[in-house]
Image (cartoon, rainbow, N blue to C red):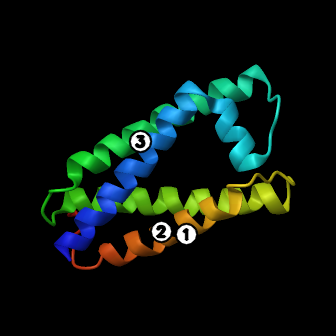
Amino acid sequence: MNATRTLFLVVVAAVEAATGLGLLLLPSVAFVLLLGLEGAAVEAFFVGRIAGAALLAIGVASWMARKDGANPSLFGFLTGILIYNTAVSILLVYAAAVLKMTGVMLWPTVAFHGLLAVWGGLLLRGIPQANR
């Protein structure tokens, strides 16, 4: 399971860091590809850049945790990634179904984050939880 966990964290690191850099540098491209938004307000670009910084942080943290052994801190980190991927999947479906915002990469992104949520959830088994 350790090799699978390492692979998971490397995939999360690569995808989230790249997406984060993309949002930091060119949020308009991400908005068009993901949500079909062209000509978004400057405030949206600003919030997109903040999201980019957060994704870059998730990517770096995932990369740094890739060799960690099973411990309560890793359980907490993987739980956070599970929550993130689940929320992103739900929010993007909401964007399409309710807000009618869809771009060419919306559904592949929903599927990808859904897959990461399931994969990450499965990885939580066998990792000790923190003492409460």
Percent across and percent down for residue 8 are 33, 64
User: CB under 8 Å between callouts 2 and 3?
Assistant: no
Which label belongs to residue 114? 1
> Which residue is rendered at x = 30% and y = 44% of the image?
61
User: CB under 8 Å between callouts 1 and 2?
Assistant: yes
Percent across and percent down for residue 99 are 85, 52
Question: Is residue 58 shown to the viewer in this render?
Answer: yes
Neighbours of disc 1 within 10 Å: few (<14), some (14-19), many (20+):
some
Q: Quadrant of residue 76?
A: bottom left
Q: Identify the image quadrant of the N terminus.
A: bottom left
Q: Secondary structure at mark 3?
A: helix
Q: Identify the image quadrant of the C terminus.
A: bottom left
> Which residue is rendered at x = 67% and y = 55% of the image?
105
Q: Is residue 24 left or right of residue 28?
A: left
Which residue position is annotated with label 3?
17
Which residue position is annotated with label 2?
117
In this view, the residue farthest toward the left is 69
Q: Nearer the viewer, residue 17 or 93?
A: 17
Distance Cα–Cα, label 3 vs label 1: 18 Å
Mark 3 or mark 1, earlier in chain: 3
